[in-house]
Image (cartoon, rainbow, N blue to C red):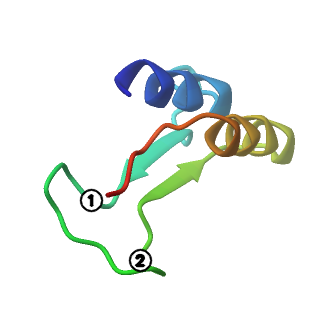
């Protein structure tokens, strides 16, 4: 869900905070194992990281089949 992913990045502080954003480790069609990282969130403050992390866990941002 691109809108949800963009929202998570904004909650982390992007694009205003140059150290903030997220990194997608996999792309559509990529096979992942149970403990493989899928998404990493970067933020310049603990509060922004918590906001973004909460949003990522609250919504179904990624659908894994």
User: What residue is shown with label 1?
Assistant: 26
Residue placed at 40% from the left, 51% from the top?
23
Quadrant assignment, res 54: top right
Furthest residue in direction right, as rendered: 47
Horizontal side, residue 30 vs residue 42: left or right: left
Report the front residue among 20 and 9.
9
Residue located beneath label 2 in the image: 36
The secondary element bearing badge 1 is classed as loop
Where does the image place residue 32, in percent across and percent down from the top left? 29, 73
Q: Estimate the spatial distance between the alpha carbons at disc 2 and disc 1, rounded to whole Å.
A: 9 Å
Name the disc covering residue 2, or none.
none
Q: Is residue 5 above or below residue 44?
A: above
Q: How many marks?
A: 2
Disc 2 to disc 1: CB gap under 8 Å: yes
Looking at the image, which residue is at 13% across and 56% down?
Answer: 29
Which quarter of the rendered picture does the C terminus lie within? bottom left
Quadrant of the rendered image containing residue 2: top left
Marks 2 and 1, the one that precedes in the sequence:
1
Image x and y of residue 55, in percent: 69, 34
Q: Is residue 27 above or below residue 61?
A: below
């Amino acid at each position: 869900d691109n809108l949800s992913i963009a929202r998570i990045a904004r909650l982390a502080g992007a694009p205003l905070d140059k150290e903030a954003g997220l990194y997608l480790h996999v792309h559509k069609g990529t096979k992942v194992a149970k403990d493989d990282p899928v998404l990493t969130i970067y933020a310049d403050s603990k509060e922004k990281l918590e906001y973004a992390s909460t949003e990522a866990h609250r919504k179904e941002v990624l659908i894994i089949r």
